[in-house]
Image (cartoon, rainbow, N blue to C red):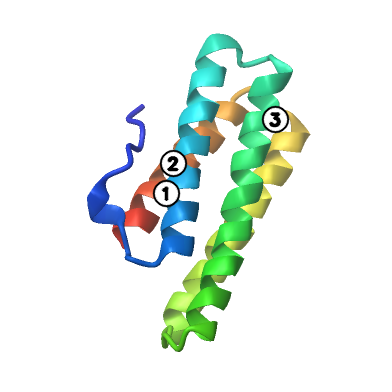
Amino acid sequence: MQHVEWKEEYLLAMSQLDNQHRRLVELLQEAYRLNEEDAAAPESNLSLLELIDFAAFHLGYEASWLDRNGYEVPAAQRRGAEHLKRQILRIQNHYFKGGQDRTEKILSFMTRWLANHLKG
């Protein structure tokens, strides 16, 4: 699976959001690295949960930040962000159910989501 790498083209010139976007990339890379080393290790599980948690936090923070700073966010985009947030939380729930393929599915989803989020 292709990893997401940080690119300068992702910069928004909004330091708080840029820092969170960089952190999301770092967390995703760390989750992949730890999963490849030992998917059953506690560190791998914690890394994956940290990624999921931070992604959900980021979506809420980003919407709030845009509101506070006078950016108009179309209703469709708000609904899309809320839908993504719910998807991320469902993934977290799936993780705790312990499916055999849970880590790969979560990493795959998070990679696609983050790549689209940074480009969009």
Q: What residue does disc 3 label?
A: 46
Is 100 on the left-hand or right-hand side of 63? right
Dot 1 falls on a residue whose secondary structure is helix
Of residues 6 and 76, the one nearer the viewer is 6
Q: Residues within 10 Å of mark 1 (few under 14, many from 20)?
A: some
**Corner quadrant of residue 11:** bottom left
Determine whether the residue tagged by mark 2 lies in a helix, strand or loop. helix
Q: Could you say which disc has been placed on residue 25 in the image?
A: 2
Amino acid type at circle 1 is Leu
Q: Residue at x 61, y 56 (%)?
A: 56
Position of residue 67 in the picture relative to residue 72 (left or right): right
Label whose residue precedes the other's in the sequence (3 or 1): 3
The image shows residue 88 at horizontal and vertical percentages of 60, 52
CB contact under 8 Å: marks 2 and 1: yes
Sort mark 3 into few (<14), some (14-19) or many (20+) by Cα contacts within 10 Å: few
**Residue 15: percent from left, percent from top:** 42, 62
